[in-house]
Image (cartoon, grey):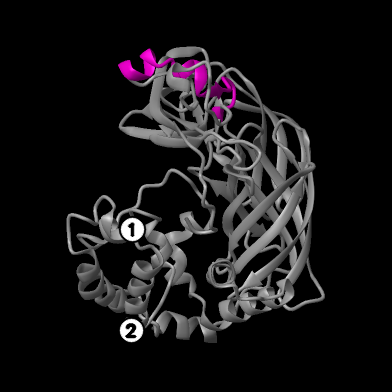
């Protein structure tokens, strides 16, 4: 972002190859340690609709009203450099002090005398974390991995990922071969580069669609996000685990729950799963083992109609997953997220941003509440309030996919069908109802607003 700003605002000429080399060098020599970036992974991974909070009484109003507060939290400077940043803001954005939450106070004085010293204290240029990370042994991404996650609109998936070193330092190529839990194939490939010893950035093609991938490779089990670079909302959280055999263990289950009286495709992930008896409890019948390897079990199972709700005693050989897979008769509670979502209308020049919602189910077993993961629901939208109803926001703002929870905003206006030729914005109530149990519902709010004109990597 700094190099781009120098080029756009100040006319600095940097060839694209030199720009890549400079970014790589600076990231490796003056980047952030994993502990320093951990609090802002959501921003780095472009997870939208998050609510920020900071341990300072005025930082939100002073710095996080024009861009995310996390953008500054991902920087480290000496106090003099933080002061220069304050001067830069006033010099570059001259109207800033006349805006809301600035004109009612001495913005420049507070920023210079309170915010800059606080940032210098909490985010100093020198840190023990960075020194330790420079000396630490970093995980090598090369090798065979398994990856899994939930793709909104498509479902849960799993895949074998093979990572090989490229010609350049910290550059890699990868291939992906997997499937969704309903049996549809999932294939892909891509190129990646690792910055600062752990910040994985990849361009991927999955089933013919282009994506970006951000992973934290400082962990034994790297986690991160895959997202559509043209619509950040369309993305999926993923986890990776080395295929190389470690201790026999069960790590994950897809899905996270099984409903009584139904037949399911069940996928178990972990290590050492190629040997030993498979046992899912007396009330779960194993019809077929579709695939079995040391790191994955794919099975067709059927659940007894009289299933006793609770954690199922999942066992594969010596490995046991006591709270890995829930069995349930009914959904007792539903939770829709995000609680407040923002979607954006768009056109060819400013792509729209979708609204993506998920619904997690819960069942009550005695005093214990069990999470069921994603459960089947039907989605709908309604006016949020009387004004939204009067303005016919449901009609004009866009379309909610009843099966997936993905809201597609309308095109940018002005819209001649609306009063005053208004834009196709809206204020909507998003509703989810459990399939077969329409009385179990939850809802959240969706603001459909105007285009995002400025799209830096860290917003």
Q: Nearer the viewer, residue 131 or 457?
A: 457
Q: Which of 247 and 449 is in front in this view?
A: 449
Query: Is residue 242 found inside the magenta-colored segment of the image?
Result: no
Q: Name the residue under label 1.
A: 95
Residue 254's image quarter? top right
- Where is 218 relative to 47, above or below? below
State whether residue 148 appears in this view: yes
Q: Nearer the viewer, residue 369 or 386?
A: 386
Of the residues under marks 2 and 1, which one precedes in the sequence? 2
Query: Is residue 393 found inside the magenta-colored segment of the image?
Result: yes
Do callouts 2 and 1 mark residues in contact (Cβ within 8 Å)?
no
Q: Residue furthest right?
A: 167
Q: Tell me where residue 182 appears, x and y as whole percent.
A: 72, 30
Q: How many marks?
A: 2
Q: Residue 363 carries which label?
A: none
- Where is 351 relative to 167, above or below? above
Q: Could you classify mark 1 by the number of other residues whose Cα lies within 10 Å: few (under 14), some (14-19), or many (20 or more)?
A: few
Q: Tell me where residue 301 appears, x and y as whole percent.
A: 67, 28
Q: Give the range drawn in magenta.
A: 386-409
Specify the quadrant that holds the N terminus: bottom right
Q: Distance between the residues labelled 2 and 1?
A: 24 Å
Q: Residue at x 44, y 68 (%)?
A: 74
State whether residue 332 appears in this view: no
Q: Which secondary structure lies at badge 2?
A: helix
Q: Which residue is drawn at 63% across and 79% down?
A: 22
Q: Which residue lies furthest to the left in this view?
A: 105
Image position of 202 (left or right of 283)? right
Q: Which secondary structure lies at badge 1?
A: loop
Q: Name the residue under label 2.
A: 80
Q: Tell me where residue 286 appears, x and y as whole percent.
A: 69, 30
């Amino acid at each position: 972002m700094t190099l781009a700003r120098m080029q756009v605002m100040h006319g600095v000429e940097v060839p694209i190859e030199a720009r890549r080399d400079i970014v790589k060098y600076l990231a490796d020599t003056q980047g952030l340690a994993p502990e320093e970036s951990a609090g802002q992974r959501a921003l780095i991974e472009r997870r939208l609709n998050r609510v920020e909070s900071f341990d300072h009484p005025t930082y939100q109003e002073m710095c996080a009203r024009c861009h995310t507060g996390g953008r500054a939290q991902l920087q480290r400077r000496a106090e003099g450099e933080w002061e220069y940043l304050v001067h830069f803001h006033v010099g570059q954005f001259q109207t800033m002090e006349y805006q809301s939450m600035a004109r009612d106070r001495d913005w420049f004085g507070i920023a210079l005398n309170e915010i800059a010293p606080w940032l210098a204290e909490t985010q100093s240029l020198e840190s023990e974390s960075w020194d330790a990370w420079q000396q630490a042994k970093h995980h090598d991404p090369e090798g065979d991995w398994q990856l899994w996650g939930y793709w909104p609109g498509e479902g849960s998936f799993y895949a074998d990922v093979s990572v090989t070193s490229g010609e350049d330092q910290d550059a890699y190529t990868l291939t992906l071969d997997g499937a969704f839990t309903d049996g549809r194939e999932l294939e892909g490939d891509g190129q990646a580069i690792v910055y600062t010893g752990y910040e994985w950035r990849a361009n991927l093609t999955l089933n013919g669609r282009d994506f970006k991938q951000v992973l934290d490779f400082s962990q034994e089990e790297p986690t991160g996000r895959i997202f559509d670079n043209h619509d950040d909302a369309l993305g999926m959280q993923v986890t990776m685990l080395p295929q190389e055999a470690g201790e026999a263990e069960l790590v994950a289950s897809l899905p996270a729950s099984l409903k009584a009286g139904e037949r399911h495709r069940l996928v178990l992930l972990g290590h050492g799963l190629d040997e030993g008896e498979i046992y899912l409890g007396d009330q779960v019948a194993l019809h077929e083992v579709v695939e079995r390897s040391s790191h994955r079990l794919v099975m067709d199972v059927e659940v007894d109609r009289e299933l006793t709700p609770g954690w199922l005693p999942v066992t594969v050989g010596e490995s046991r997953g006591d709270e890995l897979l829930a069995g349930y008769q009914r959904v007792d509670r539903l939770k829709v997220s995000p609680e407040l979502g923002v979607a954006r209308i768009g056109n060819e020049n400013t792509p729209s941003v979708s609204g993506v919602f998920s619904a997690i189910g819960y069942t009550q077993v005695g005093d214990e509440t069990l999470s069921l993961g994603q459960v089947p629901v039907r989605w709908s939208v309604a006016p949020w309030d009387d004004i939204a109803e009067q303005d016919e926001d449901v009609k004009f703002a866009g379309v909610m996919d009843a099966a997936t929870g993905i809201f597609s905003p309308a095109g940018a206006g002005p819209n001649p069908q609306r009063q005053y030729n208004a834009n196709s914005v809206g204020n909507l109530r998003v509703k989810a109802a459990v399939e077969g149990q329409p009385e179990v519902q939850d809802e959240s709010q969706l603001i459909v607003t105007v285009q995002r004109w400025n799209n830096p990597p860290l917003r």
